[in-house]
Amino acid sequence: MNSDSFKDKIVLITGGGQGIGKGMALAFVKEGASLAIVGRNPVALEETQNEIIGLGGECRYFQGDISDEQTCREIVGKVVEAYGRIDVLINNAGIMKRTGTLDTSNDEWRSVIDVNLNGVFYLSKLVLAGMKERKVGNIINITSANGVTPHPNASPSYGASKAAVTYLTRHFAMEFAGDGIRVNAIQCGPIESEMTDQWSDDYRQKSLTNIPLARLGTAQDVASVALFLASEEAAFITGISLNLSGGKLMQ
């Protein structure tokens, strides 16, 4: 892509202070976008903001918990006040638990659903209203292969929340296509992150044997797909969940 492919575009990324979210933020700003990043860790958000500014980019951060509807309303209001609009929303923020069904408390179930599903709905609904009015927009949801097939090391709440976001992706795509809005998802397999840094060597090797490309994905892998889906090169693509798993999940 050209370094100004997203010039004058406003991109809002949740969970943008670290990991996959940070990787996407850096990728979009290098293509000329102005960034708004959201998260719960102000230190990580500020560090990412400073890194983006150091690259000559524009970035503002907003601390908040997207599981709260009023917080989402305030965040969207502040971003629109600062930039005038939101062109691309990337719903990346999420939490994962590893408890089995019988050990999953109702509070834990609700906390995962609140962030991974309800937060996506709250933010998307708010942003879609403005996109519908302008007759243009793009939403990308970060989902997971665990939303398609269960994993023994992931809680049922995580897989259920990601499967539900895949449905929301398709529903939004269908409902708002006539308004010039495209909605897609990136269905991630194992991605290098702070979480995988905690894996033992044995667990890492076992995981790699299940991935035909014999490596974990990277934040840059996800960012490259997000850039494509948000670009005019993908102008005829909506309602898909693009499988990014190194061949682990073949559909």
Image (cartoon, grey):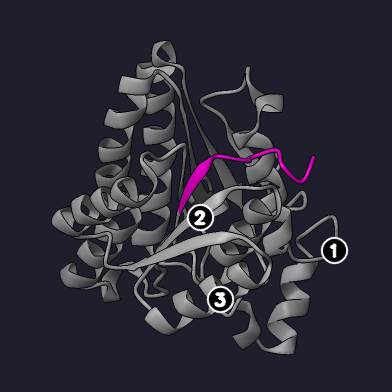
Q: Is mark 1 on a helix, strand or loop?
A: loop
- Residue type at tag 2: Leu
Label 3: few (<14), some or many (≥20) within 10 Å?
some
Q: Which mark, by number, is residue 35?
A: 2
> Could you tell me if the residues under marks 2 and 3 are in contact, i.e. CB atoms within 8 Å?
no
- Front in this rendered view, residue 177 or 165: 177
- Quarter of the picture holding the C terminus: top right
Q: Earlier in the sequence, mark 2 or mark 3?
A: 2
- Front in this rendered view, residue 121 or 48: 48
Q: How far apart are marks 3 and 1 (CA)?
A: 34 Å
Q: Earlier in the sequence, mark 3 or mark 1?
A: 3
Up/down of 110 relative to 123, above or below: below
Q: Quadrant of residue 192?
A: bottom right
The magenta stretch is 1-12
- Front in this rendered view, residue 220 or 96: 220
State yes or no: residue 2 in magenta: yes
- Front in this rendered view, residue 96 or 137: 137
Q: Mark 1 points at which residue?
A: 214
Q: What element carries label 2?
A: strand
Residue at the top extreme? 178
Coordinates of residue 83 in the picture (x, y in percent):
39, 47
Q: Name the residue under label 3.
A: 50
Q: Which of marks 2 and 1 is nearer the N terminus?
A: 2
State yes or no: residue 251 in magenta: no
- Residue type at tag 1: Ala
- Residue type at tag 3: Asn
Residue at the right extreme? 213
Up/down of 53 relative to 205, above or below: above
